[in-house]
Image: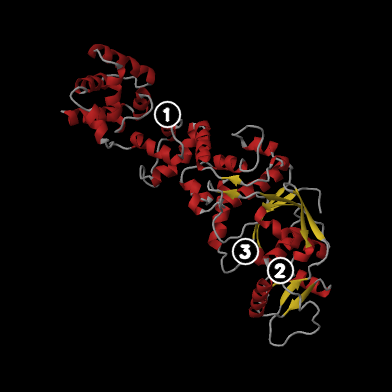
Amino acid sequence: MTDTIRVRFAPSPTGHLHIGGARTALFNWLYARHNGGTFVLRIEDTDRTRSTDEYIEAIIEGMKWLNLEWQEGPFRQTDRFGVYRDYVEKLVQEGKAYHCYCSAEELEQRRHLAIAQGKPQKYDGRCRDLKDPVPGRNPVVRFRTPQQGETVVDDLIRGSVVFENSQLDDLIILRSDNTPTYNFTVVVDDVDMRITHVIRGDDHLNNTPKQIHIYRALGYEIPKFAHLPMILGADKTRLSKRHGATSVMAYYEMGYLPDALVNYLVRLGWSHGDQEVFSREELINYFSFENVGNAAAVFNPEKLLWLNQQYIMATPPEKLAELVTPFLVKETIIAEGQALDMAWLARAVKTLQERAKTLVELAKSLRYYIVEEVTFDEKAKEKFLNDKSLPLLKDLNNALASHADFSHAGLEPVFKALVEKHGVKLGALAQPVRVAMTGGTESPGIYEVLEVIGKEKALKRLEKAVSIIA
């Protein structure tokens, strides 16, 4: 085994990349980056009834969106069946594995009998010392697991975990249809890919002693293990769809930034003092298993939303304008392929980014800047577009029609002069103008809004408001 650290993320393509899988990938990626190692992507697709190419593509799409680049792969286990069979044959020839001819029905009957007698539900080993094959039956191949002593897993997160070998089964490593099983393929792949550290969820901890025995039987060095604690929902049950979106790409659809989700996921189980918001460089620099807790982490959607808002506020408006554009299409604010002045859009984004928690929210807020005509909120229209505001809006329309400077600094004196003339407070003018410009009562500062909307569109909206009142 090399001195270079090599880790892998090995999802099964039986569904989309979910939150738990993404965190496992992230911890592998960070450990590799922190130590100058290699991150391998492997697709464990031996379950041919549930694995699909569509899910493989979805997993890769999720990894790319999170910017978790891999150096090697993606490798597919279905491309390596010949390799696994060669290793199985080696173990059979060395007496470390054997053919088992027990049928599924027989095994089920014995399982029920063991339950009735209060005995362990494990294979009873009756084919262990068979000399001759049983005619008319396709055998499986079982691994000859040591039955005495104990196996110790020295886990980088949990410390030493002890398993009694007497409780372990002679697990099947090759099915009767000649396809290999998970616990065997994992070991062979990790050996062939020179994996030094196996970082995965603690739902795999019970598989680890079985795999350690296979490493030893094949004569290979055992990698170091780190089993990450589970992620739970707010009700302290295992995270599932009922706790909200669990697919990584569902968070893209909801308008989350990948760096915000990465930041949140790494904090589910890892900490660095009281710091909450991290750059990627900081995460890579600080990451170690010493600061990973062994207690289950609780997924908090509100915390993720808060973190996403922090990232939106910190993103340069020019970058945010690029990121929000697909959502403008989804919200039917612009048409597919419609070109926008990106410098102008960045200015519009800058006025709104401190208010938006997601890119979807930001896109919806941008609507009144982009569309030709706004739809009025009826209550806002009734309250602010009335006889009281009519003279103010008329005078403003006339003043702006001949006014050249539509910047914040150029607009402010126009407003001040009008409120002095009419003897009212600024809000008495600003709020009706806000409704005329946006259709509602909430927006950034009125000078900023007018500057972004521009003179031509602003005058049209003022004229419309005046005509509605009149």
Res 99 → quadrant: bottom right
Q: In the rendered view of the protein, which quadrant contains the N terminus?
A: bottom right
Of pointers 3 and 1, the one earlier in the residue sequence = 3
Residue at image x 75%, y 47%? 156
Q: Can residue 329 be seen in this view?
A: yes
Q: Is residue 67 visible?
A: no
Mark 1 is surrounded, within 10 Å at the Cα level, by few (under 14), some (14 to 19) or many (20 or more) other residues, namely some
Q: Is residue 37 left or right of residue 386?
A: right
Find out whether the residues at labels 3 and 2 contact each other: C-beta distance under 8 Å: no
Residue at the disc numbered 3: 45
Residue at the disc numbered 2: 120
Res 385 → quadrant: top left
Residue at image x 42%, y 29%? 351
Q: Where is residue 216 in the image (x, y as percent from the top left)?
A: 82, 62
Residue at the disc numbered 1: 351
Q: Is mark 1 on a helix, strand or loop?
A: helix
Of pointers 3 and 2, the one earlier in the residue sequence = 3
